Amino acid sequence: MKSHYLNEDYSVRSWLLTTDHKRIGILFLLSITLFFILGGAAAVAVRLELLTPEGDLVSAEAYNRLFTAHGVIMVFFFLIPSIPSVLGNFFIPMMIGARDLAFPRLNLLSWYLYMAGGLLGLSAIVGGGIDTGWTFYTPYSSVFANGQVILAATGVFIAGFSSILTGLNFIVTIHTMRAPGLTWFRLPLFVWAHYATSFIQVLGTPVVASVIALVGIERLFGVGLFDPALGGDPLLFQHLFWFYSHPAVYIMILPAMGVISELVTCFSRKRIFGYEFVAYSSIAIAAVGFLVWGHHMFVSGQSMYAGMVFSFLSFLVAIPSAVKTFNWTATLHKGSISFATPMIYTLGFLGLFAIGGLTGLFLACLGVDVHVHDTYFVVAHFHYIMVGGTVMAYLGGIHFWWPKMTGRLYPEFWGRLSAMVIFIGFNLTFFPQFLLGYMGMPRRYYAYPGEFQVLNVMSTAGASILGFGYLMPLCYLLWSLKYGAEAGPNPWKSVGLEWQTESPPVVQNFETTPEVTQEAYAYDAQEAEADAS
Amino acid sequence: MHPESRFLAHHFDSLEQQHEAATMGMWLFLATEILFFGGMFTAYGVYRSFYPQAFVAASHHLDVTIGTFNTGVLLTSSLTAALAVHAAQAGRRRAVIGFLVATMLLGATFLGVKGFEYHHKFVESLIPGHGFVFPGPHARHAELFFSLYFVMTAFHALHILIGLGVMAYVIVLTRRGQVTPEHHPSVELTGLYWHFVDIIWVFLFPLLYLIR
């Protein structure tokens, strides 16, 4: 049997002390899946409570703790690390023809920090929970909230450093370790997207770390940093929090966009439409994304003029996002499209991201936002981006690269079926929430007036379908590890560098350092070659 | 085989590439540090503009003489750190160790003086929280000043402490012969970090002690 990164050493020690970016990617895959299941379980409880207008399943207190657990776990311990730490970790070095990331030990440290943060967060949730919402707004979080705020905040603080180290590692790797001939404009767009993401991780995360530390210190020592009773300013907290936490949304969506660029080209056998525009739009989203945080505070008492500027800038960030969407659509045009599972996820992403993005414009609009602020409209909007966008792309990417990571093919029929079940379940869950929000149902309440029940029942029914859809890949992907067909090096006939080596890859990724002679997505050249022979 | 190639990690093609990566990584790390302190500097700026009189009154309770002395200590330590890098380039291993030890001593002096100042604040009941006592009309907002003073200087002191640990490690590396004229990223990057910690203080000192 051939030696590769998985069978080279089976000991637990060899996994826990590995510095191989591929193995660390797998460690992240396993751990974020665990957190996804836990966060999903909290969502199930939330949706069950909302089946009836009365608060009957759980108490108001417990409900607050449930949606906070869902938010904290999904944002900090699943979505932010998801694509970068799993797929980025595994594939950036392979896509640029390198043997590893620039700092392999730092990469392992990043996983340990993530686990330490995640376990602290989890112990906070198990040991009493937190009811602040994932946003930790002061002075509620720092003075009044009962619960394990300090423990949870410490968890988020530590996990933040994991994210910083991952971003730092990616930037240095992309700058210094590209294979001969791999110029910046030959890089796969997945790499460009992660490059832009990394800057947000490196420059945004320290700010939330600092503000979370201040909240912890305020709560621990009773000093008044954000407490108005002591002269502090809660708005300052919101500014510092959203300075990171809005760009954090781009930490989630930009890598997803990178995945989509890889998938849409491979399954329409075409060069990407407008490579430079797609590449630069990632940078534009990261840059402008740093200047829009105030749109979370339109009704928090920030000045009207600040509101107008933030509104304008929020509209502006839609432009590079639209550029990408149009370019992916144009890539599909006259392509030889095949509906493999990753492509179904890609098409799902395009539709859901369009809805999520356009409803974002409603929220960027000052007047409309006053009406829908803190309603289910907002909840539906960001779930269309985070779940409809990021999770769809993540699953599409996992299916696409599964043969490379494991050497096995997943069952295509079940793959397609689950992609469609997830798409249907997702829309049934979240589309009614747009309507609920527009009708005025506020978020974060465990009871609601009876006239909202029909839509809420639809949403809960959709969530059940969605949950079932997520369980399917979990089962058949595990099944494929043993029973799946051998994948071979390049089952999708992709032109990406990561497919030009064995599946699973050898420890050093490539037998010899590859030399790059053409641009990314040269599918037309590949087709011409196939025709000639 | 080139004598320096024993330092080459398996995933790099050349030492040049390895150095470039290490240096870039350090600069990026320092950028994250600026943003980390940036959150606190922002908080300081906002509250100072809200309560200028209280901040002036509170600032008068800090001892400028001690602050100036400590600034001098830290700036001198930056000099010895730079001399350590210089000695590494010249391959004078004993001088490297000597300058690093001097830097550590100066850093420790800074921490000692800081601890003395903290103790003084404790005696004067200027520790924010329930026991806080401040004469005059601005007591509440002066407490905010002291909250920021303690948080910012404590985070700075933590960075000094980490720097001392790192330098102890670099001394061990130097003794083991891991520092040569062509290859001394450990000394160079520690120097970079130390200068950064120094610069943070250069901003903290006027903001907390001097603007009155």
Image (cartoon, coloured by chain):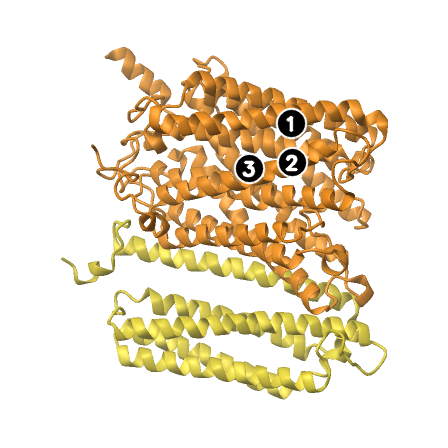
Palette colour of chain A: orange
Horizontal relation, residue B50 to residue A78: left or right: right
Q: What number is the disc on residue A302?
A: none
Residue type marked 2:
Ala
Look at the numbered disc 1 and give the secondary structure of its residue: helix
Mark 2: secondary structure: helix
For mark 2, what is the residue? A43
Q: Please, is residue B43 above or below residue A134 in the view?
A: below
Examine the rendering and report whether any part of residue A274 can be seen. Answer: no
In this figure, which residue is indicated by the disc labeled 3?
A: A37
* Residue A472, horizontal then vertical, whole percent: 50, 25
**Mark 2, chain letter?**
A
Residue A282 pos. (x, y %)? 53, 37
Nearer to the camera, B137 or A59: A59
Which quarter of the figure has residue B134? bottom right
Note the chain letter of the yellow one.
B
Check if mark 1's residue and mark 2's residue have beta carbons within 8 Å.
Answer: yes
Q: Are marks 1 and 2 on the same chain?
A: yes
For disc 1, the chain is A
- Rounded to the nearest whole Å, what is the CA distance between mark 1 and mark 2? 9 Å
Q: Classify 10 Å Cα crowding around label 2: few (below 14), some (14-19), many (20 and above).
A: many
Q: Which residue is drawn at 57% across and 40% down?
A: A38
In the image: residue B24, left or right of residue B47: left
Q: Mark 1 points at which residue?
A: A463
- Asked if badge 2 and badge 3 are on a common chain, one would say yes
